[in-house]
Structure formats: structure tokens, C-alpha cells
Amino acid sequence: MTVPFDAIALRYDELRPAKGEVLSALSKRFKELHGIRTLLDVGCGTGRYSIPLASQVGMQIIGVDASKKMLGEARRKCSTGTWEHCKIEDWVTQTKLKAVDVVMFAYVLQFLAWPRVFEQLFRNLNPSVVVIVTYEPKVFPSALYHRFIPELVQIDQERFPESVSLIEKLRDLGFKPSRQTVPTLEVVRTARDVQGIIDKGRAQYCSTLSLVRPRVAEDGLTKMQRSLLAEISSKPLVVETQHTVIVATT
């Protein structure tokens, strides 16, 4: 399944900005570490997490992504980074890079054959820190878009690995992982807020929306719009999302 990130690259940061709560949690952990100078962002996209983190902590960024236009946005925002256009599975076997301090996977493992990528990447680059930001499969049945487009639930529960599997693999590779849940809140108050959610869905800002049939997605978004408008007529709707952050050290 191919996700058309090039089509939304110019609007990606607008449609899906980095979550402040997640950035804060990552920044706090990074500042507790010592001697980290290089950050490899695997599936970096527009660099929405790695660029601010590198700026705060003082690291050099190496970003790899399969979308040329997403990389173009990252390069525009941070000309001092090294941005490489390549399919991740190919890059890990071809790179001439010898070592990095931190490897970060931010919302990207669902696109990868991650156990093999872990083994090749960590063996070749010998990082001292691994950072993963993801979602637990169990959150999807109650996720906003998934409530109205049920096909998304099965797709994402199959794509996203459980944190217990990630932690077990990291331990097998010699890391000491810790897990943190970071909640974020979005408050929907007005018809304009609802329309913004629908417009983001139609723009396929969430990659899984590009993997369902267009008619199914549009029917679900239409139902969502009616339902959300009815919900906010009596009180604001608070949407909570649980993000899983894993930091593993040697």
C-alpha cells in the first residue's frame, strides 16, 4: 500500500503540526542524556519533530524519507540538516554512515518491516539511544476518524506494532527501554472547528485515510460532520489522543 505524501507535503505541517505535549516530553528526555550530537530521523517527513528537538538540544540532524517533497519542506526549514531521499529499507543497507548517537522513529513504524530495520540499523550505526513515538493499536476503535470509518480500525490495528513487542525487541538488541504515555487534547467548540476536521480528513492528512476507498471515506466524513455538529450543540467535544513514547538507552 502506497501513501501519497508528496500530494500533501506543502500542507503537511499545517494539517498535522507537531504536538506540543509530545515535543515537551521528548525534549525533557533528550536533555537528561549526555553526549548526544547526531540524530538520525527515520521517515523524517518534514522534520516536524526532529528540527525543533535538534535546535533545543543542539544536535546535527540526518533525515531519511521516501517522499522527495516532504524532504523538500524539511530542507527549507533546516538547511543545515542532511536530508536523504531513499526508501528506508534500502537506505539501511546502502548507507555509508558509520555511527549516530540517536535514532528516532516518529509515527513511522507502521510503514516499515521494523524488526529487520531495527537489526540492520542498530548493527550498522551502533546508536546509544533509540526513540519511538507511536500509537497503541488498542486506541484506534475510539479514535475520532476511526469511529465513523470503521475500515480504518482494522487497517491501523494491523499496521501499528504493540509497544510490548517493540520493547521486547529493543531488549533483545541490548537496549534498556522505558515507556511513557503522553495524552493530547483537542477541544471542538464551533461549526468552524468541525469543518476544519472534515477538511483535514478530505485532504488525507492521516495516512490511513488514503488506504480506504474514496466513497467509504467520504460517507464516513459526512456522518462525522453531522454527528459532531449535533454533539457540540449542547457542549464542547474534548478529543483525547494517547501517544506512546519509548526511549531506549544502552
Image (tube, rainbow, N blue to C red):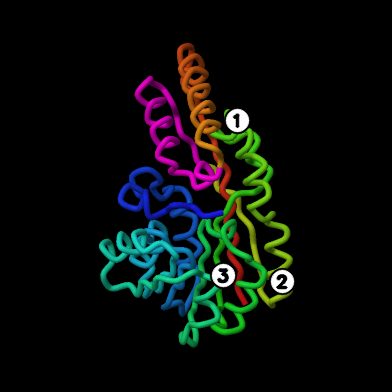
Q: Dot 1 lies on which element?
A: helix
Location of mark 2 (residue) = 171
Residue type, mark 1 in image: Arg
- 71 up-or-down from 129: above or below: above
Residue marked by disc 3: 130
The Cα–Cα distance between marks 2 and 3, rounded to whole angstroms, is 11 Å
Residue 188 falls within the magenta-colored stretch: yes
Residue 23 located left or right of residue 181: left
Q: Is residue 201 shown in magenta?
A: yes
Q: Which of marks 2 and 3 is nearer the N terminus?
A: 3
Mark 3–mark 1 CB contact (< 8 Å):
no
The kind of residue tagged 2 is Arg
The amino acid type, in three-letter code, at marker 3 is Val
The magenta region covers 184-211
In the drawing, does residue 191 fall left or right of residue 130?
A: left
Image quadrant where one finds the N terminus: bottom right
Image quadrant in which you'd find residue 164: bottom right
Please name the residue that numbered disc 1 is placed on. Answer: 147
Mark 2 closeness class: few <14, some 14–19, many ≥20 residues within 10 Å: some
| Predominant secondary structure, magenta span | helix
Camera-side residue of 150 and 196:
150
Q: How far apart are marks 3 and 1 (CA)?
A: 32 Å
Check the image and report above or below for 176 versus 227: below
**Placement of 230 over or under 147, stated as above or below:** above
Given residues 161 and 67, the one toward you in this image is: 67
Of circles 3 and 1, the one toward us is: 1
- The disc, 1 or 2, on the residue closer to the chain's N-terminal end is 1
x and y percent of residue 250 in the render? Answer: 62, 77
